[in-house]
Amino acid sequence: MAENYNSDNMPDQAAKSMKGYKIVIILLVVVLAAIATLYFLQVNSLKKEARAEKAVLEENINNLIVDLDNIKVDNDSITYNLNLERQRADSLMEQLQKERNWSRAKIRKYEKELGTMRDIMRHYVKQIDSLNQLNRSLAQENVAFRQQISDERVRANAAEERASELTNKVKMGAIVRARDIVLSALNTNDRVVPRASRAVRLRVDFVLTSNDLATPGERNVYVRITGPDGYVLAGDISSLFDYEGDKLTYSAVREIDYQNKDLEVGLYYNGSGITSGTYQVEVYMDGYMIGSTEAYLK
């Protein structure tokens, strides 16, 4: 009789087990559906955030371009550098509009570059304000000279010469500028090669322009070379210098002796990471960015 009892209950136990399995499977399906829905909602939310941040970046770049276009100054050196920043802003906008694969790291990169350009523009605005103040001061000085020595011809002539000299120096500004910046790829024999694949190091040549207002003497000049991947080429992690309260990485540094005359300078980058593409070159001295250019290596 015991054997008959166990045999009769086996179908009921199997049915209960199958029912339990079905419940577990249903629960798993519900959980997976919930997880999939949450993932889909999260992805859509991230896409919306990326589009919103991209729109904000585009608006900020457009505002920067408008601000640069509105700056007017009667100074060839400042005008030249403002035009370079205008080109950089156009290039940044073009890169932003072509960007397809968004990430927070890329957004932060664009925001950082935009912040750097905004800081550079503020620097030039401050410099223009200083030049305008000096011009107003000079105008007042000219009036005072003319009033004090109107009866003495010799003193009047001396005052006019002094006023003319000060006017010319104010227009030039006190900052030494770098012009004719050229990036060259060199092989093992230090010969210029047309392709980055054959290069073992880079050379940056430029001319420090003459400036009577600048203080003569020895100082360091730094070069930052930003590669096609957006990273600054550097031979060592300790290659840093001070710029407006921050530590920036430099690619090459050289001590020069500036004597208020045109000075040809060449700096070498001997590290790795030389690839084909577009490079950004910036020159710094005395705490200022004194010149920049863009170069393409095949």
Image: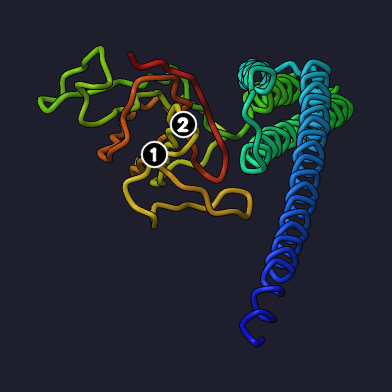
Location of the N terminus (image quadrant): bottom right
Percent x, y for residue 146?
85, 24
The local secondary structure at tag 1 comes to loop
Q: Is residue 170 left or right of 259 when viewed as pictured?
A: right
The local secondary structure at tag 2 comes to loop
Residue marked by disc 2 = 229
Residue in view at x 43 percent, y 17 percent:
295
Residue in view at x 29 percent, y 28 percent:
203
Percent x, y for residue 82?
67, 21
Percent x, y for residue 174?
60, 34
- Spot the residue most to the front: 1
- Say which of 298 and 30 sits in front: 30
Tell me which amino acid carries mark 1: Leu
- Spot the residue most to the left: 189
Work out whether 175 lies above or below 220.
Answer: above
Work out whether 294 lies above or below 221.
Answer: above
Mark 1 and 2 residues: CB-CB less than 8 Å, in contact? no
Work out whether 88 lies above or below 6.
Answer: above
Name the image quarter holding residue 234. Answer: top left
Spatial CA distance of label 1 from label 2 is: 10 Å
Tell me which amino acid carries mark 2: Asp
- Say which of 131 and 59 sits in front: 59
Q: Nearer the viewer, mark 1 or mark 2?
A: 2
Percent x, y for residue 81?
62, 22
Residue marked by disc 1 = 233
Location of the C terminus (image quadrant): top left
Name the image quarter holding residue 80. Answer: top right
Task: Name the image colouring.
Answer: rainbow
Label annotation for residue 24: none
Task: Give the class, few, some or many, for how many residues have Cα within 10 Å of label 1's Cα (few <14, many ≥20).
Answer: many
